[in-house]
Each structure stands twice: as structure tokens, then as C-alpha cells.
Amino acid sequence: MVASQILNHLLFSSFMVMAIFMRSSMSKFSEQFPSTVSIKRMEKMTRFHFYFHDIHSGKTPTAVRIIARAQNGGAGNFGTTFMMDNPLTEEQEPESKLVGRAQGMYAFASLHDPGLLMVLNLAFVEGMYNGSSISILGRNPVLENVREMPVVGGSGLFRFARGCALAKTITYNPKTNDAVVEYNVSVVHF
Ligand SMILES: *[C@@H]1O[C@H](CO)[C@@H](O)[C@H](O)[C@H]1NC(C)=O
Ligand SMILES: *[C@@H]1O[C@H](CO)[C@@H](O)[C@H](O)[C@H]1NC(C)=O
């Protein structure tokens, strides 16, 4: 190639690059990045251990029934739905340090056994996690010793989170329905 051809070639290819750059920067609605960019980001893993207090009794219940059992509710109390804003504490005792709240719903979604559909956000208030949240969506067969539920996302420090939550009932009062549940939550996030 003679010098002018090389120059033309360089000019033309930088023009192409500019054109592509301009085109992608003009569309504000979405942007795509080469996957290598995300591969270079460091993934972190965070594990949590806390106690969830499902309080139905007393002056300030934190879980309330919002939908009654269906007429054909069967053995599973099918249809019964609760809304909660349950405290999450560091230790089993309800007076121990508050680390966050479990805000969301749980509904009896099985006709045959007490199998709950859980839809909730863990809204943290403790230290660097204050303001960040983790979203859980899963099945919770409450009579089983340990239940596993998927972490489907998160916000703040837990952007792009995925992971799993393990739940185990520590105490349950059948008269009041009050329960304390131990949670181990593991999340992978950026
Ligand atoms: C968490 O953040 C909120 C809002 O910024 C603030 O009011 C609150 O005091 C913080 N809580 C803790 C425990 O740091
Ligand atoms: C949570 O993890 C601790 C420590 O590994 C363990 O003793 C406990 O049984 C676990 N609980 C659940 C519900 O997974």
C-alpha cells in the first residue's frame, strides 16, 4: 500500500469507529457491552446469619392476614395470605440487635400441605448494608426442617445478586402463630 492508501484506510476505519460509537451513544434506552467487561468485574460472596421474627400476637403484630383461606382450601389452608414487616435480629432474642426487616408477603400456595409462596425483600439497616436489599422469591414448605429459597436479585451493594436462603424454624407457638426462624443467606454479587 502506498502512503496515501494507508492514510485513507486509517481515516476510514476511525470514521467507522466514530460512526458506531455515535450510533450506540445516541440510543439512550439501552446499552450493550462486550461480555469481557463484565467478566473482568470481581464477584463477591456475602453470607448472612440472622433471626426472623414472625409476630402475630400482641399490640404490634408485624405479620397480618390480608386474604382469607379459600373455601376449598384443603389441608394446605390454600389461599391464606399474610403481609409482613418482620424484624431481623442478630441473635435469637427479639431484643437483640436489629439488622434489617423482612418486608413482603407469604401465601399458602399448596392445596395439600402448608407450602408457602414467599415474596419478600430483606431490607438491611446494619452498618455498610444499611439501605441495600436482597429479594427472595421461592417455595417454603414450613413443616420441613430446613427450607431453601432462591435469592433472585438485590439493590445497592447487592446489585445483580443471586444466591440462596436457608430457613429453619427455631420456635413456633401454635396458639398465636408467632415464630422465630433462623436464616442463612448466601449471595454472589458485584
Ligand atoms: C440507615 O440509613 C437511614 C437513612 O439514611 C438513617 O436514617 C439511619 O439512621 C441509618 N441506620 C443505621 C442503623 O445506620
Ligand atoms: C446456618 O449456619 C450455621 C453455621 O454454619 C449452622 O449451624 C445452622 O444450622 C445453619 N442454619 C440453617 C437454617 O441453615
Image: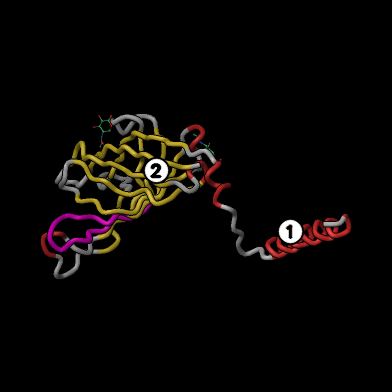
**In the image, residue 75 lies at what x, y percent?**
11, 60
Identify the main secondary structure in magenta.
strand
The residue pinned by badge 1 equals 17
Q: Amino acid at mark 2?
A: Arg
Residue interval drawn in magenta: 104-118
Q: Residue furthest front?
A: 1
**In the image, residue 49 lies at what x, y percent?**
34, 33
How many other residues sit within 10 Å of disc 1, few (<14), some (14-19) or many (≥20)?
few
Question: Is residue 161 shown above or below 19?
Answer: above
Dot label at residue 42: none
Q: How many marks?
A: 2
**In the image, residue 42 lies at what x, y percent?**
52, 38
As helix, strand or loop, the secondary structure at mark 2 comes to strand
**In the image, residue 150 lies at what x, y percent?**
33, 49
**In this picture, residue 183 sits left or right of residue 159:** left
Question: Is residue 33 shown above or below 123?
Answer: below
Distance of label 1 from label 2 (alpha carbons): 49 Å
The residue located at (41%, 39%) in the rendering is 100
Residue 46 quadrant: top left
* Magenta run includes residue 126: no
The residue located at (39%, 51%) in the rendering is 152
Dot label at residue 101: 2
